[in-house]
Amino acid sequence: MTLDDLILAFGERYDVLFRRATPTDIVAGVEAGVPRPVLDFFFAHEPKDPGIGIVRLFTVNQLVAGLATVPAIAWLASLGYYPLAGTPGDDLYCVRPVAGQKLEAQPVRLFGHTTDYTTTTPDKVAELGLLVAPNLEVFFQKALNGSIESSPARA
């Protein structure tokens, strides 16, 4: 299955409706400083409805609003991590875009929404997040079959 197939299957399983992000949404993301690889992902796979699963995909507008109003999102973004989705408990599934690489190849980490990120550095922030998938394909496979971690607390 391709990443697109996995995302569509995820949508069918958890009642997520997808649409393309509008040009207005993309411009708002650019103005908020969201990296192009993240916006490219949303352009093709923006949820119109978050669905009923453990993984709740964000829209561009939710990400942009979170950058201005949610301290965890703002600090993680300042450290290079951008949430694509969240849990029902408001924890954040994030990727760290790397210049010249596709977003699909980046690991996905789960960060707690109550963690204080103000005292960490870009080099140390990954240690605060739980690695849930080595790339987006595995992330959506795990989300689809219900084996994705939904709590950043380590056992």
Image (cartoon, rainbow, N blue to C red):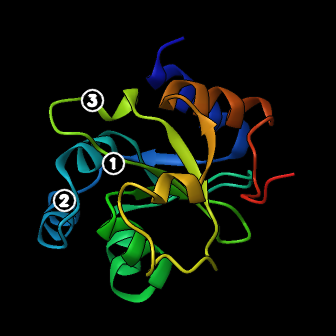
Q: Nearer the viewer, residue 135 or 123?
A: 123
Cα distance in 3D space between marks 1 and 2: 8 Å
Label 2 neighbour load within 10 Å: few <14, some 14-19, many 20+: many
Q: Residue 141, percent across and down? A: 65, 26
Q: Which residue is painted at 41% across and 67% down in the image?
A: 76
Nearer the observer, 122 or 152: 122
Check if mark 3's residue and mark 2's residue have beta carbons within 8 Å: no
In front: mark 3 or mark 1? Answer: 3
- Point out which mark residue 42 bears: 1
Q: Measure the alpha-carbon separation of dots 3 and 2.
A: 18 Å
Q: Is residue 1 above or below residue 33?
A: above
Query: Sequence order check: which comes first, mark 3 or mark 2?
Result: 2
Label 3: state its secondary structure: loop
Q: Above or below — where is 139 with respect to 40?
A: above
As measured in the structure, the alpha-carbon distance from the residue carrying label 3 to the one carrying label 1 is 13 Å
Q: Amino acid at mark 2?
A: Ile
Is residue 41 in view from this perspective? yes
Q: Quadrant of residue 12?
A: top right
Q: Amino acid at mark 1?
A: Phe
* Up/down of 3 relative to 66, above or below: above
Tell me the SS state at disc 2. helix
- Look at the image and tell me in which quarter the N terminus lies: top right
Q: Residue furthest bottom?
A: 69
The residue wearing badge 3 is 102
Residue under label 2: 26
Q: Residues within 10 Å of mark 1 (few under 14, many from 20)?
A: many
Identify which residue is drawn at 39% across, 42% down. Answer: 45
Can residue 62 be seen here? The reply is: no
Does the CB distance between marks 1 and 2 fall below 8 Å?
yes
* Image point (61%, 42%), residue name: 131
